[in-house]
Amino acid sequence: MLKDNANFSFWLTLSSFFMWSCYPLYFKQFDPSISSIEILIHRIIWSVVFLAIVLFFANKFKEVIALLKAPKTRYALLLSGTLISLNWWIYVYAVANGYLLQTGLGQFLTPLISIILAYFFLNEKISLITKFSIIIVTIVLCVQIYSLGEIPFVGLINSVSFAFYILVHKKVNVSALPALLVETLLLLPFSLVYFYFIQSRSLGHFGANFDSILMMASGIVTIVPLLAFNIGSVKINLTSVAFMQYIIPLMSIGLGVYYGEILNTTKIISFVLIAIAVFMVSIDGIIKRKKR
């Protein structure tokens, strides 16, 4: 029975990473004329709706109310909500404008940026292997900037925004789903104002059409992988989770190539070096946890 539960948890967690990695396939279904900002505000609005339903039936509303009543936590979640909305927006923008390879680069960088932020803000030590990995990544970024002739802003915004989001969550230490409801709830007024503004001027795309179904479904698309991860990851070891995270950037790269983005030799070498650096850090972290 325990083995069956462990297997179920493993596949459930794996499915959550697979669902996250398939986001480009979903966002590509939107009409190209719809702006990434409009998609973002609908994701916020419908996330609030579906999260409220899920947490109501899970009897978690007390947690949500407690988070809203605590001023420091509320402000922290407003900050993290702003960061995750920035992350959501840049991701949709990347999918729509052919920056999936940059997104993959950013997703590979996120764990290392999180480590750097933990060093500065949480006083966590950086191992020799991690320092070496950071040097590798810095060299790779310099090569990428030289090759592109510009800073890869899309990938960096994606990785830095999510790394700071993780940092804020570490500081406040709250449950993922109630926290996400509070985050989106705090951003809801801004989203509704923008929604009214574009709809009242016939600039919005919400109505009796397929894109509106996609907009409403964005709430479900946001919640389902998070639910699967929360339920599954509790009962499997962190080693498995550490390696599952590679699925997302690898899929971003694969889908970027599928959608016609150019993967030249410089980019291939860059991705391989970053993957090695992140792999080294993952192994180092696993060894440390086993020693504790």
Image (cartoon, rainbow, N blue to C red):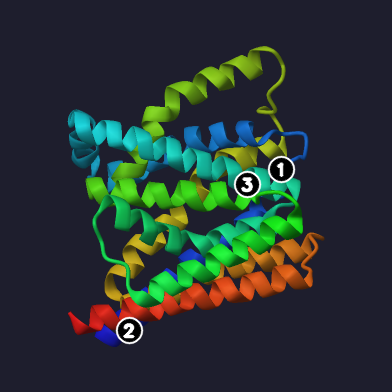
Foreground mark, 1 or 2, reads 1
Check disc 3: other Cα within 10 Å, few if <14, some if 14-19, many if 20+.
some
Residue position marked by numbered label 3 in the rendering? 153
Instruction: Identify the residue at horizontal 24%, vertical 83% (top origin).
Output: 290
Q: Amino acid at mark 2?
A: Asp
Q: In this rendering, does residue 106 appear at all?
A: yes
CA–CA distance in space, label 1 to label 3: 23 Å
Foreground mark, 1 or 3, reads 3
Q: Is residue 160 left or right of residue 208?
A: left
Q: Quadrant of the C terminus?
A: bottom left
- 3 or 2: tag closer to the N-terminus: 2
- 1 or 2: tag closer to the N-terminus: 2
Q: Is residue 40 left or right of residue 48?
A: right
Q: Nearer the viewer, residue 208 or 22?
A: 22
Instruction: Identify the residue at horizontal 67%, vertical 48% (top origin).
Output: 94
CA–CA distance in space, label 3 to label 2: 44 Å
Q: Secondary structure at mark 1?
A: loop
Q: Amino acid at mark 3?
A: Phe
> Against 25, is 292 above or below?
below
- Residues marked 3 and 2 touching at CB (< 8 Å): no
Q: Nearer the viewer, residue 124 or 29?
A: 124
Q: Quadrant of the N terminus?
A: bottom left
Residue 2, picture quadrant: bottom left
- Residues marked 1 and 2 touching at CB (< 8 Å): no
Check disc 2: other Cα within 10 Å, few if <14, some if 14-19, many if 20+.
few
Instruction: Identify the residue at horizontal 44%, vertical 21% (top origin).
Output: 189
Residue position marked by numbered label 1 in the rendering? 30
Residue position marked by numbered label 2 in the rendering? 4
Pinpoint residue 229: horizontal percent, then vertical percent. Answer: 39, 63
- 1 or 3: tag closer to the N-terminus: 1
